[in-house]
Amino acid sequence: MYNLNFKEMKKNVLNSGRKIAVAVFLMTAVVTNAQAPVPPSEPRPGMERPRPETIREISTLTGKVSKMAVNDDFVYDGFYMTSNGESVLVKFPPHLGSQITALVKNGSSVSVRGIADVAPNGEKSFRMNSLTTNGKTVEDVATAVPQTAPQEVSVSESGTITQLQKNKEGNAVVGIFIGNTILKMPPHIYQQLGQSLVNGAKISFTGFKKPENAGEVAEKKYNIIHARTISVDGKEYSL
């Protein structure tokens, strides 16, 4: 009887010791983890936080308009003016085209508030915030969001390449003239098709017609088509 009770007591003491040891270990681990400094998490590659843009000073240019400028869709989006003996390209959003072309003509005296910049080809440019001429002012304000989005018009056409449209620097193709249609594709597609895109080549394509956006004014009306598929030299490609 005495031996049995002694064995049970010894067993209970050992079990209690183990429980106490486990509890002490867990408490130590919690305290250690709570006190350990957490290193700052670094952003993964491609997830870096964008740096804030440098603030840009607004200044004013005055001078005379020499000629209007258009983008690759032949829509007015700027004009050249002579200010302090220098030629400057003034850029404005295409949706302001109807307002600006109604006020600004070659030889017009204008005052432009905006931000000085440099165009991709290195020429001086000026991003317009507002323009004043003959006592009237045009402000660069956001356009109202249309209640219904423009409906996409799909097309399927064929024809003959009459000309390749180059960028203003003349070193890259930005469109394909097919009569009164300009076919638009991503820049790398022109490079991949390379020698296939020549004047006189037969071409067929499907795509969507560029909608006429409010306020835009075109120097010349073209059918602007953004291609989805193209067939040239007997081969069809999906874009």
Image (spheres, rainbow, N blue to C red):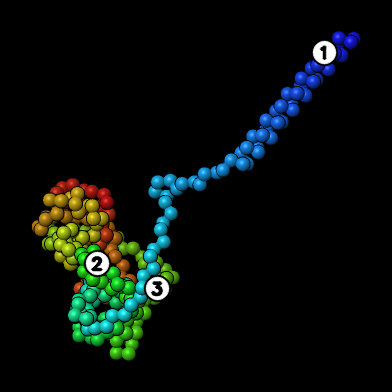
Q: Position of residue 183 (x, y in %)?
A: 21, 60
Q: Which residue is mark 1?
A: 7
Other residues around mark 3 within 10 Å, as few (<14) / some (14–19) / many (≥20): few
* Furthest residue in direction left, as rendered: 200
Relative to 14, residue 105 above or below: below
* Furthest residue in direction bottom, as rendered: 135
Which residue does the image show at 26% across and 49% down from the upper left? Answer: 238
The local secondary structure at tag 3 comes to loop
Give the number of marks: 3
Instruction: Give me the disc on residue 142.
Output: 3
Q: Which residue is mark 2?
A: 119
What type is the residue that disc 2 sits on?
Ala
Q: Are marks 1 and 3 in contact (CB under 8 Å)?
A: no
- Estimate the spatial distance between the alpha carbons at disc 1 and disc 2, rounded to whole Å: 93 Å
Other residues around mark 2 within 10 Å, as few (<14) / some (14–19) / many (≥20): few
Which residue does the image show at 23% across and 64% down from the upper left? Answer: 120
What type is the residue that disc 3 sits on?
Ala
Q: Position of residue 216 (x, y in %)?
A: 30, 74
- Answer whether residue 178 is visible to the viewer in this image: no
Q: Nearer the viewer, mark 1 or mark 3?
A: 1
Q: Position of residue 25 (x, y in %)?
A: 67, 30
Q: Position of residue 61 (x, y in %)?
A: 28, 80
